[in-house]
Amino acid sequence: MSLKRRSRMAAKRQACALVFAALGDETRLALVAKLSRGRPYSISHLTQSSKLTRQAITKHLRVLESVGIVHSVRTGRESRFEFDPQPMEEIKKYLDLVSEQWDQVLSRLKSFVEN
């Protein structure tokens, strides 16, 4: 494997790790679930069903924004946050690749054990 390809793969793993880390919080997962409904939400709307303050919700949104899962759009004095599925699609591709690798390993193990 070439150095360039290994470098690209390492960068993809790092990006996936950052997304996994961002999603490793229950509050952020709930925010992603709400935002993935397909429409932008203001911080006011996102805090309505939460016991957290606007500042806490904003902090969580900034973490999600830093890995590209959400982005903000300024509308007048208010920011609205929208879900961006691209990082999640990259995670899915990564998990599919890992799953395929494990399937191959388990298939070889099965063949070895049965022979």
Image (cartoon, rainbow, N blue to C red):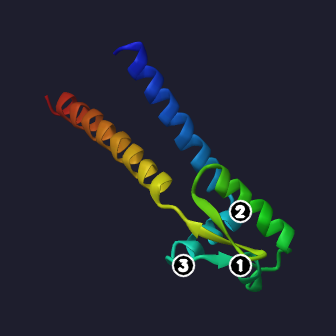
Percent across and percent down for residue 13 are: 50, 35
**Residue 28 picture quarter:** bottom right
Rate crowding at label 2 as few (under 14), some (14 to 19) or many (20 or more) other CA atoms within 10 Å.
many
On screen, 25 above or below 67? below
Q: Nearer the viewer, mark 3 or mark 1?
A: 3
- Nearest the camera: 48 or 94? 48
Label 1 sits on residue: 46
On screen, 57 above or below 3? below
User: Do the residues under discs 2 and 3 have CB atoms within 8 angstroms?
Assistant: no
Label 2 sits on residue: 61
Percent across and percent down for residue 35 are: 58, 73
Rate crowding at label 3 as few (under 14), some (14 to 19) or many (20 or more) other CA atoms within 10 Å.
few
Q: Quadrant of the C terminus?
A: top left
29 sits to left or right of 99: right
**Residue at image point 83% right, 66% down:** 56
User: Do the residues under discs 1 and 2 have CB atoms within 8 angstroms?
Assistant: yes
Q: Secondary structure at mark 3?
A: loop
110 sits to left or right of 71: left
Label 3 sits on residue: 39
Q: Secondary structure at mark 2?
A: helix
Can the viewer see residue 24 in this picture?
Answer: no
